Structure formats: C-alpha cells, structure tokens
Amino acid sequence: MQRQVYKARFKKQLEELLKKTMEAARAQAGERERIKQSLEKDKQLVQSLRERNRKEMRRLLGKVEPFEELTD
C-alpha cells in the first residue's frame, strides 16, 4: 500500500517535471526563433545602410573638384 502511494507520488512529480521541461523547451525555441528573425532584420538594415552610404559617397565625390597640388 505504502509503496503504491510512493509510486503514484513519484509518477505525478515526474509528469509535472516533464510538463515544465516541455514548456521551457517551447519557450526557448520561440525565443530562438525571435532572435533569428531579429538578426535577419538587422542584417537587412545593415545592407540597406551600406548601399545608401555608397550612393551618398558617389554623389558627394561627384561634386568634389579634383585636387590640384600647389607648386611653387
């Protein structure tokens, strides 16, 4: 009788632990996916900014007059 009570209690604790572990695993997977998407957005933003900077640099370099060395 006593042994069955311990077994039932142990089984219940084990099921609770498994349930919590699965919930934590799902939460961690969701967090990982969110971080992955955020990283992808950041990469796209960096690429966009680099392209915009290149265009702006070309535009500005086109306005600069060629440098002429001064000679005495």
Image (spheres, helix red, strand yellow):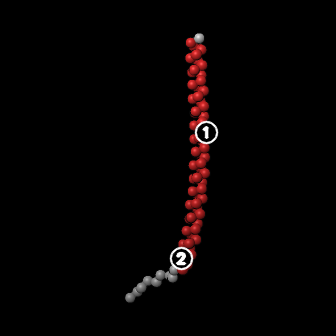
Name which quarter of the figure residue 51 lies in.
Answer: bottom right
Q: Which quadrant is home to the C terminus? A: bottom left
**Dot 1, crowdedness within 10 Å: few (<14), some or many (≥20)?**
few
* Above-or-below relation of 18 to 50: above
Tag 1: residue type? Arg
User: Circle 1 is placed at which residue position?
Assistant: 26
Q: Are marks 2 and 1 in contact (CB under 8 Å)?
A: no
- Residue lying at 59% horizontally and 40% vertically, measured from the top left: 27
- Mark 2 or mark 1, which has the lower sequence index? 1
Mark 2 to mark 1 CA distance (whole Å): 52 Å
As rendered, which of 24 and 59 lies closer to the eye? 24
What SS does tag 2 mark?
Answer: helix
**Dot 2, crowdedness within 10 Å: few (<14), some or many (≥20)?**
few
Name which quarter of the figure residue 57 lies in.
Answer: bottom right
User: Circle 2 is placed at which residue position?
Assistant: 61
Name which quarter of the figure residue 45 lies in.
Answer: bottom right
Task: Find residue 53 and report its horizontal and vertical position in percent.
Answer: 55, 68
Tag 2: residue type? Leu
Task: Find residue 71 and report its horizontal and vertical position in percent.
Answer: 40, 86
* Above-or-below relation of 53 to 25: below
- Residue lying at 58% horizontally and 68% vertically, measured from the top left: 52
Task: Find residue 21 and report its horizontal and vertical position in percent.
Answer: 58, 33
* Above-or-below relation of 42 to 6: below
- Residue lying at 58% horizontally and 45% vertically, measured from the top left: 31
Q: Between tags 2 and 1, which lies in front? A: 1
- Residue lying at 53% horizontally and 76% vertically, measured from the top left: 61
Q: Which quadrant is home to the N terminus? A: top right
Q: Residue furthest left?
A: 72
As rendered, which of 28 and 52 lies closer to the eye? 28
What SS does tag 1 mark?
Answer: helix
